[in-house]
Image: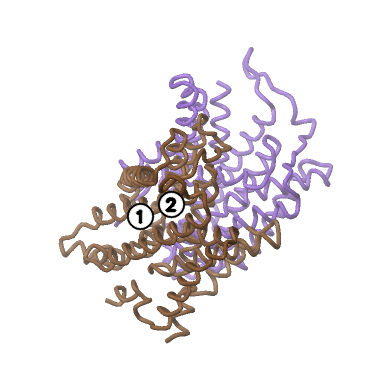
């Protein structure tokens, strides 16, 4: 039961990441390999702001604001020039960005991992049913992730900007032809996806040690989520993220029991990719993707 | 036809051909000076050049961006390491086994990955290399996460082994030359024409009654095997076997070498690998944070330099 909760949590964080990946690709046709590094930067910022700002809530806001500023700068200085480039160029430039960020945080904060202190009101555990209690903080981040998902859903379905984003994901040329300010739209989508990734990093910060490269495994998992769900599909990203979160977390418990220690360990680490390979083999465009013309 | 000429650009320009021969002679001379550091540097360039050329077959010629090529490099590394643990170190056994293992795994990965294209291809090759990475990491009897020391170098004959820098350097130079020769011939053959044509105009090639898939799969498998050759060299160069050689950062670095030189050529990636190794040595002797500057160079390369180092060279000579 606890594992199901953990799985859902991982799923929600992956969802926040995958939405960014799928939106930037859907709207701007941009492959962003620096997405994991942005999550890491979020975690570093929260470690930094909690150590200087006494109020946890304010620290979170400050960290989000820092990430927003960084994302805006990165978009204007680098990413803007990539929209019209080939996938190969995009992969390389954002890979370059990710190693710059990964090494940049080492230059600023050093190689030792940082730890984020939880405020006292988020410590402890809650009893959900008799005999089953669950850490309050983990429960809280599940809630925040669900709220963020809802807010995103509202933004995308109810607001004007959301309508333009969805339109852009469907048919980019059409949105431009209708006179939407594409530059502004692209910058906001990039900043939005960076904030979602950073939110994931902020939530992870107090749970794991904050260090360089911490975002990379999550990036790769979220790419798997996007592929399983179908590129450009938000619904696909949600279902696939939860599926991947559960398969990963529950698998870590089940496989070693089923296959023994070593094989089980290997299987649990690669289960997601096996799942992805199976999905690709059956449906090359993902579970919710439109058929791609080859 | 333009592409076919581009495939062998060193045939186009006498000056470039001349400077390449000069570089080769220089590379052959270096090990004679008995300076292990520089001798190993030459070997390192060759190891990465082999991997970069093999990757360029997929990225440049077939036009599909693979972000998981370190998987096959790692297969070479682990083949050399694991076989040596069982006492098998003869190059006559290690190399064929590494080639076959990479060929088979390349066949499996390729047959699934090639069903997709574009973005999906990038992600799925990355995912497969992560899978291989985790398998290597999970092999606790073979060092797990930390890896293990290469128990013994790959040997030619008794007393002549790849642990001697000169032997290693010359072996890798000759291997690289063979790889360059074979891949150039391959790419100017009918097979290569189908590959390039499927990149440039897949619809036309289909309407001519040719399915690109089997050709691309064969290319993917060949590329995997060649990359494993580089891996065997890498294990001997470092005398260490570690999952880091399969990491996605390694795959990214291979792509960087390809594009730094020039994609879609055979000589470009070789120059790219040489430039990469020089950059790596220079930057890391100057600062601990050399990856930071490498990343910046990478971004500048994408934004400002259109056709890579080879483009710079050929443009000047024309």
- Whole-percent x, y for residue A12 in the image: 56, 38
Observer able to see residue A149: yes
> In the shown orientation, is residue A274 left or right of residue B151?
left
Label 1: chain letter: B
Pick the front one: B209 or B287 = B287
Discs 2, 1 touching: Cβ within 8 Å: yes
Label 2's element? loop
Q: Which label belongs to residue A185?
A: none
Counting residues from the start of the chain, the first of labels 2 and 1 encountered is: 2
Quadrant containing the C terminus of chain B in the rendered view: bottom left
Farthest residue, direction left: B209
How far apart are the two marked residues, 2 and 1, measured between alpha carbons? 9 Å
Label 2: chain letter: B
Q: Which label belongs to residue B69?
A: 2
Which residue corresponds to the image point at 48% horizontal and 19% vertical from the top-left?
A: A257
Q: Which chain is brown in the picture?
A: B
Where on the picture, by quarter, is residue B314? bottom left
Which residue corresponds to the image point at 35% horizontal and 61% vertical from the top-left?
A: B178
Chain A painted colour = purple
Q: Which residue is mark 1?
A: B223
Q: Up-down: is A177 above or below B313?
A: above
- Whole-percent x, y for residue A250 in the image: 50, 26
């Amino acid at each position: 039961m606890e594992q199901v909760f953990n799985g859902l949590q991982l799923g929600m964080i992956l969802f926040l990441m995958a939405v960014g990946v799928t939106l930037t690709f859907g709207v701007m046709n941009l492959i962003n390999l620096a997405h994991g590094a942005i999550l890491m930067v979020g975690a570093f910022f929260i470690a930094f702001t909690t150590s200087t700002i006494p109020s946890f809530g304010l620290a979170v806001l400050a960290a989000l604001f820092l990430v927003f500023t960084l994302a805006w700068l990165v978009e204007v200085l680098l990413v803007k020039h990539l929209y019209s480039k080939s996938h190969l160029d995009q992969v390389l430039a954002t890979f370059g960005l990710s190693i710059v960020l990964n090494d940049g945080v080492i230059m600023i904060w050093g190689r030792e991992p940082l730890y984020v202190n939880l405020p006292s009101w988020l410590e402890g555990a809650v009893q959900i049913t008799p005999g089953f209690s669950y850490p309050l903080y983990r429960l809280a981040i599940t809630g925040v992730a669900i709220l963020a998902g809802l807010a995103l859903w509202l933004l995308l379905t109810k607001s004007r900007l959301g309508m333009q984003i969805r339109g852009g994901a469907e048919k980019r040329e059409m949105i431009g032809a209708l006179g939407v300010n594409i530059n502004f739209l692209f910058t906001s989508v990039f900043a939005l996806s960076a904030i979602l990734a950073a939110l994931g990093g902020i939530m992870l910060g107090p749970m794991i040690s904050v260090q360089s490269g911490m975002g990379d495994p999550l990036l790769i998992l979220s790419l798997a989520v996007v592929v399983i769900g179908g590129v450009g599909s938000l619904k696909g990203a949600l279902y696939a993220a939860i599926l991947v979160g559960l398969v990963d977390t529950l698998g870590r418990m089940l496989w070693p029991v089923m296959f023994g220690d070593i094989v089980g360990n290997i299987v649990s680490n690669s289960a997601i990719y096996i799942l992805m390979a199976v999905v690709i083999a059956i449906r090359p465009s993902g579970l919710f993707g439109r058929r791609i013309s080859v | 036809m333009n592409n076919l000429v581009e495939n062998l650009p060193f045939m186009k320009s006498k000056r470039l051909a001349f400077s390449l021969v000069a570089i080769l002679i220089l590379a052959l001379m270096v090990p004679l000076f008995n300076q292990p550091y520089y001798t190993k540097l030459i070997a390192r360039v060759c190891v990465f050049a082999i991997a970069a050329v093999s990757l360029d077959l997929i990225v440049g010629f077939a036009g599909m961006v693979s972000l998981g090529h370190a998987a096959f490099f790692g297969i070479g590394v682990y083949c050399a390491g694991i076989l040596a643990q069982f006492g098998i170190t003869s190059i006559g056994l290690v190399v064929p086994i590494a080639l076959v293992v990479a060929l088979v795994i390349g066949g499996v990965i390729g047959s699934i990955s090639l069903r997709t294209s574009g973005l999906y291809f990038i992600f799925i090759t990355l995912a497969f290399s992560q899978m291989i990475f985790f398998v290597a990491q999970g092999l606790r009897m073979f060092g797990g996460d930390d890896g293990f020391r290469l128990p013994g170098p790959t040997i030619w004959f008794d007393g002549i082994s790849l642990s001697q820098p000169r032997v290693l350097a010359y072996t890798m130079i000759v291997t690289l030359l063979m790889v360059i020769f074979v891949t150039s011939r391959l790419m100017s053959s009918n097979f290569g024409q189908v590959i390039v044509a499927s990149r440039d105009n897949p619809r036309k090639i289909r309407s001519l009654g040719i399915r690109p898939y089997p050709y691309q799969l064969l290319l993917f498998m060949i590329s995997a095997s060649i990359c494993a050759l580089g891996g065997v060299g890498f294990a001997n160069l470092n005398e260490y076997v570690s999952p880091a050689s399969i990491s996605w950062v390694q795959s990214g670095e291979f792509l960087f070498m390809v594009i730094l030189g020039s994609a879609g050529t055979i000589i470009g990636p070789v120059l790219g690998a040489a430039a990469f190794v020089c950059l790596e040595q220079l930057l890391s002797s100057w600062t601990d944070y050399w990856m930071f500057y490498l990343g910046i160079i990478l971004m500048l390369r994408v934004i400002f330099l259109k056709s890579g180092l080879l483009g710079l060279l050929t443009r000047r000579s024309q």
